[in-house]
Amino acid sequence: MQRKLRYYGDPILRQKAKPVTDFNEAYLKQLIAEMDEIMQKNDGMGLAAPQVGDLLRVFIFRPVIEVSPRQWELGPLEIYINPTLSNPSEELWVIEEGCLSIPKLQVPVERPLAITIEAYDLEGKPFQKSADGILARAYMHENDHLNGVLTIDRTTKRARQQIDNALRKIKAKYS
Ligand SMILES: [Zn+2]
């Protein structure tokens, strides 16, 4: 495996990713396989390509599925290439959000409850989905990564101040 998880402080996390124009299956499959491995190794359910150093508009997601009472596992891999979000609900909600690139720091983030996502699959075929709750939130979180936006940009000033030291430590540790 070539790619590595990028952490807060890595400038690539602040850059805007470029659309996939060449649906090179071998390249994309390798990228996605590595992203999936890194995501699962770090107990994540979503990961965007810039988080592994590829400035492409690609993210992956695995829903968490309850397999038996109080037992969850990751569901099938979903791939979103060149996603666009639309129809955000007027209703907003706040929960604490984590991010693999900002380990162990959760901050409250307000987002629309529901969203529509349009994207392309590995073969370059477009598809559309509507989602709400955690699913919609995950799509918005991962889509933010494609624009260089992190949870800490969307949290309250107070929460941001509270984690300021911890953020500085992450930056120092991984750079
Ligand atoms: Zn993230």
Image: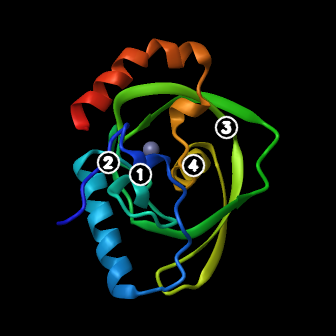
CA distance separating discs 4 and 3: 12 Å
- The quadrant holding residue 173 is top left
User: x and y percent of residue 167 in the render?
Assistant: 37, 24
Residue labelled with disc 3 = 111
Q: Quadrant of ligand 1?
A: top left
Q: Check mark 4 vs ligand 1: CB closer than 8 Å? yes or no.
A: yes
N-terminal of the pair, mark 1 or mark 2, is 2
In this rendering, which labeled residue sits more in front, label 1 or label 4?
1
Residue labelled with disc 4 = 144
User: x and y percent of residue 23 in the render?
Assistant: 47, 85
N-terminal of the pair, mark 2 or mark 4, is 2
The residue that appears at 40% across and 66% down in the rendered structure is 77
**Residue type, label 1:** Ile
N-terminal of the pair, mark 3 or mark 1, is 1
In this rendering, which labeled residue sits more in front, label 4 or label 3?
4
In this rendering, which labeled residue sits more in front, label 1 or label 2?
1
- Give SS at disc 3: strand
Q: Are marks 1 and 2 in contact (CB under 8 Å)?
A: yes
Mark 1 residue crowding within 10 angstroms, few (<14) / some (14–19) / many (20+): some
Residue 163, compared with residue 16, is above or below; it is above
Figure label count: 4
CA distance separating discs 2 and 3: 24 Å
**Residue type, label 3:** Arg
Residue 49, compared with residue 92, is above or below; it is below
Q: Are marks 4 and 3 in contact (CB under 8 Å)?
A: no
